[in-house]
Image (cartoon, helix red, strand yellow):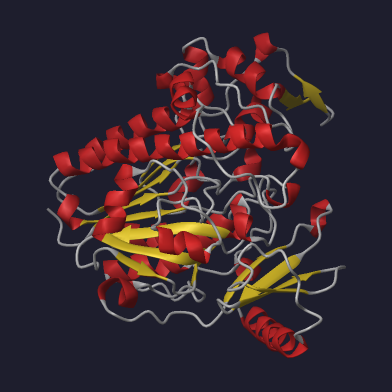
Amino acid sequence: MSEKPNFIFFFPDQHRGDWMPYNEEVFKTFGMDKLPLKMPNLKKLMEKGVTFTNTISSSPLCAPARACLASGLRYKDCRVAGNYENYPIDQKTYYSVLKEYGYSVGSVGKLDLHKPTFYWGLNGWIPDLEKMGFTHVIDNEGKWDAIQSVIMERDDHGRKKRVKPTNFKPKGPYLKYLADNDLLIKHVNDFMKRFGKKNLNSDPTPLPEHAYCDNWLTNNAINMLREFPYDKPWHLVVNFTGPHDPWDVTKRMKKAWEDVSFSSPNKGNENKIEEEIKVRQNYAAMIENIDRNIGLILEEVERRGELDNTIIVYSSDHGEMLGDFENYGKTRPYRGSVKIPLVIAGPNVKKGIYSDALVELQDLTSTIIDYVGAKMPEAKDSLSLRHILEGNDNVHRKYQISALDLSKVGVKEWKMITDGEFKLVVEYGNAYRLYNLKDDPWENNDISKENPLILNKLLKELNLIYSNS
């Protein structure tokens, strides 16, 4: 067995940070009643480790967030502005540092480090992934990327044209699996009924349990663990596709949640409350299913006899608005979109601790590098959390920043900064917005006009930090 710790990083897509099995006191700070979530495996990890309740995404969009994590850089310098850009091959990743230090570096699920290419290799491997530092990969399609990759193609003149179902050609391993099991057309047709952010279709998927993407990729994770040699350390990131929209769940998952009640969204659409509650039931069902799969994967780590030497991380790339302010998806500077979960457990990590330290997603980069005993000076915006995980220190960042600039595709650029009490949103073309997170955790009331001194202080810090990042 290796003396260096192993790492297993559970990384679901679009899990908002206030939908976790927290205790009631934490929910009170969020202005919420305790949610009826079922995550027994994650709850055990929380009891064995540290739960961070104030973690935000570096940028609430798949490709930029994952680029920030890979590089240890804030959004401004990560060189992936949106989902239309690949991760630059010449930019260092923490995966490559682990490889240099003798690790087997694995990944299953949707990495989103080459998102716009729409080709993943039918076995989930393309050469660029090796250049990024991976030794073992089954990189599969995201939910909507999978559909788009088969229904559209370009003709000889570069024009997009619709593909007939009989001519669907998988570009990645998940749709190939569905095609091999005569489920591809059925799956695509089901997703086309769900298309659009305003589509709140919560009907169950026609797919059987074994073909549901998160269940399928969990089997890949277990098989990959079995391939790792015992005489060298390993790192495995499990990129679940849920609880990303659409709200597809299996019949089993649907049945378990159809009678569970949830509160309606914050300032949601009053004409769609019944539909929105059903969406929330499905969202909870996806989270519970991820938790179930986490248990299966950890059973394999235990079977290998390596659980005591494995650092376990649970987080997400960004959140999900889930109907708040009548919005779904991410890309917004609000809590539902920006706030993410974070739990870390493992050897020498304090047990059963809640921390309200201000954390940014890319801090996980230096945390992992720190535990390896390596160096990654390129990760200049990443601060290791080890001092909190092993000690009594709760001081981390004075300010958190998240940002997104999709002006290239017609969406306004914005930046946000918070000191944990006040939050400033700077959205280009709009007036500044300031919120008191202690009194107004839902960010409903703009207090910018009444508090110019606080606004100017945060604006000054934002400009200073952002310009130097």
Does residue 189 sit above or below 398 in this rendering? above
> Quadrant location of residue 295?
top left
* 228 displayed left or right of 140: left
Give me the residue at 73% from left, 90% from top: 453
* 27 displayed left or right of 150: left
Point out residue 293 in the picture as x, y percentages from the top left corner: 35, 36
Point out residue 47 in the picture as x, y percentages from the top left corner: 26, 57
* 70 displayed left or right of 407: left
Residue most extreme to the right? 429
Give me the residue at 48% from left, 19% from top: 251
Does residue 445 sit above or below 86 in this rendering? below
Q: Quadrant of the C terminus?
A: bottom right
Give me the residue at 73% from left, 17% from top: 163
Point out residue 343 in the picture as x, y percentages from the top left corner: 37, 58
Residue 91 appears in view: no
> Quadrant location of residue 291?
top left
Give me the residue at 84% from left, 53% from top: 410
Front residue of 12/168: it is 12
Point out residue 391 in the picture as x, y percentages from the top left corner: 26, 78
